Amino acid sequence: GSSKAASLHWTGERAVSVLLLGLLPAAYLCPGPAVDYSLAAALTLHGHWGLGQVITDYVHGDVPIKVANTGLYILSALTFAGLCHFNYHDVGICKAVAMLWSL
């Protein structure tokens, strides 16, 4: 039960990390909406899981953990929504990074 779920979670974390390694060159070589939205999802999920581990390690007590986790879900949802809004209504993640590099 619990150990299988933890194992699947760990495998998912590794898969997203490997996906990010592939998306970075893809963003440079063939930028476009598919890569932009994939980056938005993968970066948000990667950050969500990372900050979740910080909460697990450093937040103690039932109420503070619930508050921190609620805040994390809100932050993650807003991050994903903001990245999707940026992709749809502006230049997108790939083009924005290319513009920053050209400065």
Image (spheres, grey):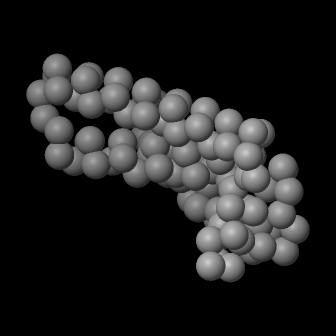
Q: How many marks?
A: 0
x and y, in percent, of residue 91 in the image: 76, 53
Q: Judge by depth and name the residue closer to the eye, 76 or 55.
A: 76
Q: Judge by depth and name the residue closer to the eye, 15 or 28.
A: 28
- Residue at the image point whose x is 80% and y is 69% from the top: 26
- Residue at the image point whose x is 73% and y is 46% from the top: 90
Q: Is residue 18 visible?
A: yes
Q: Judge by depth and name the residue closer to the eye, 41 or 1.
A: 41
Residue 53 to residue 94: above or below = above
* Left or right of 3, for residue 23: right
x and y, in percent, of residue 32 in the image: 85, 57
Residue sitting at the far front: 103
x and y, in percent, of residue 79 in the image: 52, 39
Quarter of the image holding residue 35?
Answer: bottom right
Q: Quadrant of the C terminus?
A: bottom right
Quarter of the image holding residue 3?
Answer: top left
Q: Is residue 23 visible?
A: no
- Residue at the image point whose x is 65% and y is 47% from the top: 40
- Residue at the image point whose x is 22% and y is 28% from the top: 65
x and y, in percent, of residue 86 in the image: 67, 43
Residue 101 to residue 66: above or below = below
Residue sitting at the far left: 61
